[in-house]
Image (tube, helix red, strand yellow):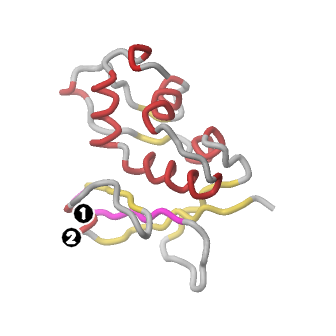
Amino acid sequence: MKIKDVKAVQDLAYCVGQWGCYLICLCIVAEEITGKEIDILKAAKYLIDNKIVDHDYQRPKAFKNSMYVFDANKVLAYLGCSGYYIDKVPQLPEGFDGKYIIRHTLEGATHFTVPDYDPMTYNKVAAEGRVTAYYLVRHRP
């Protein structure tokens, strides 16, 4: 993807950085599964353009409030993990040794991390909130 192929590429980068924690975590998991590097901006543009992720980075900033992943399984498939799916559970199963994403919540706000990485240097929701779900990445038999 050439930079000029994206109208207002800086807006796209801002959206991913500000609201794209779940998408970033899905990309991290996909990199670990496939062993391939993922261009997060290219992935975000494709997923937004194909209505798998809801966010219009061309709207005025006053109307931007989230980067909602409609279907994490479609995101994984696009990223090269078509045999995998997300299984949301309230507690991490004892002995689970696979990949997973953690959802943190604080005062109505949500932030996603993976066990060994937070997409932000500091996030109050992750630091002070509570874990409210685990998104297990499972392989279809």
Question: Against 104, is 20 above or below?
Answer: above
Amino acid tagged 2: Glu
Image location (x, y in percent) of residue 78: 63, 38
| Residue closest to the eye, 141 or 29 | 29
**Quarter of the figure that contains the C terminus:** bottom right
Numbered label attached to residue 106: 1
Of 2 and 67, nearer the camera is 2
Q: Is residue 101 magenta?
A: yes
The secondary structure that most of the magenta stretch takes on is strand
Q: Left or right: where does residue 62 sit relative to residue 103?
A: left
Residue at 45% x, 46% y: name it: 23
Up-down relation of residue 49 to residue 96 (above or below): above
Three-letter amino acid code at the position of disc 1:
Leu
Depth-wise, is mark 1 or mark 2 nearer the camera?
2
Q: Which residues are magenta?
A: 100-108
Q: Are marks 1 and 2 in contact (CB under 8 Å)?
A: yes
**Mark number for residue 128?**
2
Quarter-of-image position of residue 71? top right
Identify which residue is drawn at 19% across, 62% down: 124
* Residue in view at x 36 percent, y 71 percent: 131
Q: Residue at x 40, y 20 (%)?
A: 3
